[in-house]
Amino acid sequence: MVRPDFPQSMPVSEVELLVFVMDGSGSMNETNTPDGRRKADHLYDIVKGVIERLQKSTKSDAFRVSFVYFSDSVKIEEKNGLKYFLLSDALQLLKNPLDVTGGGSTAIADALATVKEILKEFSADEGLPDDKKATIFLFTDGEENVRAKDDVVNEAADLKSLSLSPTIATISFGSDADSNLLRTIASKPSERQIRHLEISNLESEIDTNYLFIEGHTGDNELTKRKIETIRNFVEVLSMTRD
């Protein structure tokens, strides 16, 4: 079901890249979830569900998707030399981040640096419409422990300074996540984004100064309600262009 006030179509002259940056560090093995599965399993399901919903949209052909997995190192999904795909291909290529990275530390700065290179490639792609936009969804349950926190801030600032002016939305997946840092690097929501988040009853879950959402309870549990909140947050921002 399409949410109220969502755009029902998108001209083929526009294209939007959604970059899912997924934490595959060791703590994503934790099973403090409603069904005892790993947090990484629920992250996989959330991203898969969002892509499936977008595929049913009347503007589905205007989306491209990239997957970036990170722990100690960063892995990019590729197909035929490309780092971004149609929704149908994305569903086939999506992997559980732990299956890709094998656990380890949390290299957020390196992941954002990798996203920057993807966006540069996307921006320069003459086979796509000139009107390009991008939204980055960063999911993590940990703190930067490969480089410095300032490196994370600087990499995010570099991303925002690109010609695409991408939106950065951040989602904490556990109490060990550095919520202050995630707020700092998140984009400020537009009035339109705030309106759509309110329509979807998410106003109590967000600070209207940042596109950041805390996806866990105070006792570090990933509850069924929190999982649904994260899914709604990502879906709303995926469907809401500035």
Image (tube, rainbow, N blue to C red):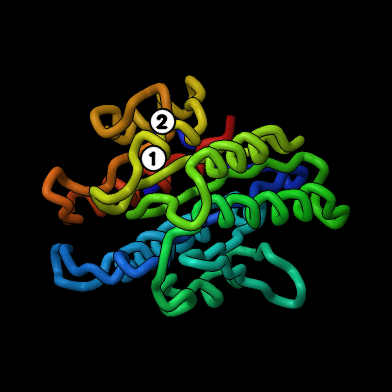
Q: Mark 2 points at which residue?
A: 196
**Closest to the observer, 84 or 6:** 84
Where disc 2 sits, the SS reads: helix
For the residue marked with disc 2, what is the amino acid?
His
At a point 41% along the width and 33% down the height, the residue shown is: 183
The quarter holding residue 156 reads top right
Q: Can residue 7 be seen in this view?
A: no
Q: Is residue 238 left or right of residue 12?
A: left
The furthest residue to the right:
126
**Dot placed on the residue nearer the N-terminal end, 2 or 1:** 1
The quarter holding residue 24 reads bottom left
**Closest to the observer, 187 or 47:** 187
Q: How many marks?
A: 2
Expressed as whole percent of the image width and height from the top left, the position of residue 44 reads: 38, 67
At a point 36% along the width and 34% down the height, the residue shown is: 180
Relative height, residue 79 to residue 207 (above, below): below
